[in-house]
Image (spheres, rainbow, N blue to C red):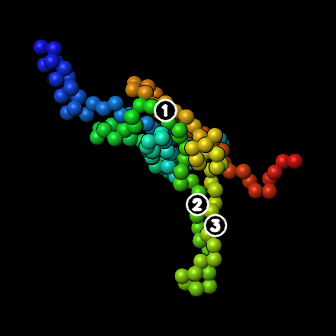
Amino acid sequence: MKRTVLFLLFSFCLFSGCSPNIRITGQVRFDDGEPVNFGEVCFETAQKTFLGRLDQNGNYAVGNTKDGTGIPPGEYTVYLSGTSLVSAKPGKGDSELIATVETVRVHPKYTQPGPGAFKFTVEEGGKKTLDLTVERPPQKGNSRR
């Protein structure tokens, strides 16, 4: 009897989409309230990275629990990627490029899994929303003395 109950419970979870994986949603804004509407939010462990693309309002979603592709429980480093804008300056010929120019649009400390990155613990039944506030990049020639 006990085995039958365990088998039925396992079968129910298997076929009904039970998964310990979790969908995380949130919004990314600059500290002045404007949404960050470019790039991706990265949830990273030593083994894997999960990405959520930012929409025009700064919203993102990572993982879809319907097909079991959500984020597994654990500790994550959270940072932004794809936030720089790279453009090319054309040369004299059609196929010649003089240089590429990178425009940094978010403070670099939020764009790598280093000291400025956020930390987030994904737990079953825990918080499923992570809103982030980031700074704009420092202005060139605006150093304080």
Q: Residue at x 44, y 42 (%)?
A: 47
Looking at the figure, which quarter contains the N terminus? top left
Question: Could you tell me how far apart the alpha carbons at marks 1 and 2 are, in whole angstroms?
Answer: 30 Å
User: What's the residue type where badge 2 is placed?
Assistant: Leu
Q: At which x and y percent is residue 85? A: 58, 60
Q: Residue 131, labelled with which disc? A: none
Whether pointer 2 and pointer 3 mark residues with C-beta atoms closer than 8 Å, the reply is no
Query: Please, which residue is most extreme toward the bottom here?
Result: 93
Residue at disc 2, secondary structure: strand
Q: Secondary structure at mark 3?
A: strand
Q: Which mark is residue 85?
A: 2
Q: Residues within 10 Å of mark 1 (few under 14, many from 20)?
A: some
Placement of 94 over or under 39, stated as above or below: below
Q: Which mark is residue 101?
A: 3
Q: Identify the residue at image location x=50%, y=36%.
A: 76
Q: Tell me the residue at 57%/44% (across/down).
A: 113
Q: Earlier in the sequence, mark 3 or mark 1?
A: 1
Q: Which residue is mark 1?
A: 75
The one nearer the camera, 16 or 11, is: 11
Percent x, y of residue 48: 43, 43
Q: Residues within 10 Å of mark 3 (few under 14, many from 20)?
A: few
Q: Is residue 134 visible?
A: no
Observer-side mark, 3 or 1, equals 1
Quadrant in the rendering for residue 15: top left
Of callouts 1 and 2, the N-terminal one: 1
Asked whether the residues under the numbered discs 1 and 2 touch, taking CB atoms below 8 Å apart as contact, a structural biologist would say no
Hey, which quadrant is residue 20 in on the image? Answer: top left
- Dot 2 or dot 3: first in sequence order is 2
